[in-house]
Image: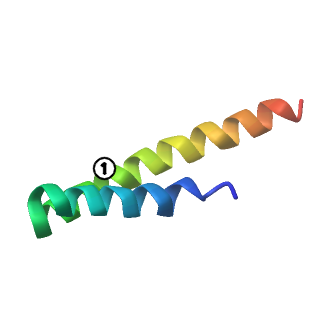
Amino acid sequence: MGCLPLPIFLLLGCGVGWLVGEKSGAVYGSVIGLAIGLVLTFLLFRAMRRGNR
């Protein structure tokens, strides 16, 4: 469950990018979605580690 934001935001970013700029937009949207997913995964793991203390 911890890495769930990664594929969700990757696919959402790809879809939004495709709607905005077709193929190149899908690539940029995927990268932005992946970056957001990584940040959210990091925040989720940090919150879970703090909750166990």
Quarter of the rendering occupied by the N terminus: bottom right
14 or 32: which is nearer to us? 14
**Eyeballing the image, is 33 above or below 14?**
above
Q: Secondary structure at mark 1?
A: helix
Place of residue 49 in the rendered image (x, y in percent of width and height, measured from the top left): 78, 37
Place of residue 23 in the rendered image (x, y in percent of width and height, measured from the top left): 13, 70
Place of residue 3 in the rendered image (x, y in percent of width and height, measured from the top left): 61, 58
* Visible residue check, residue 18: yes
Q: Amino acid at mark 1?
A: Ile
36 or 11: which is nearer to us? 11
Residue at horizontal 83 percent and vertical 32 percent from the top: 51
* Visible residue check, residue 30: no
Q: Residue furthest front?
A: 19
**Eyeballing the image, is 3 above or below 23?**
above
Place of residue 20 in the rendered image (x, y in percent of width and height, measured from the top left): 14, 55
Task: Decide if residue 13 is on the left or right side of residue 36.
Answer: left
Residue at horizontal 77 percent and vertical 39 percent from the top: 48
Instruction: Give the labeled residue for mark 1.
Output: 32
Quarter of the rendering occupied by the C terminus: top right
Residue at horizontal 54 percent and vertical 53 percent from the top: 5
Quarter of the view holding residue 21:
bottom left
Task: Decide if residue 23 is on the left or right side of residue 50.
Answer: left
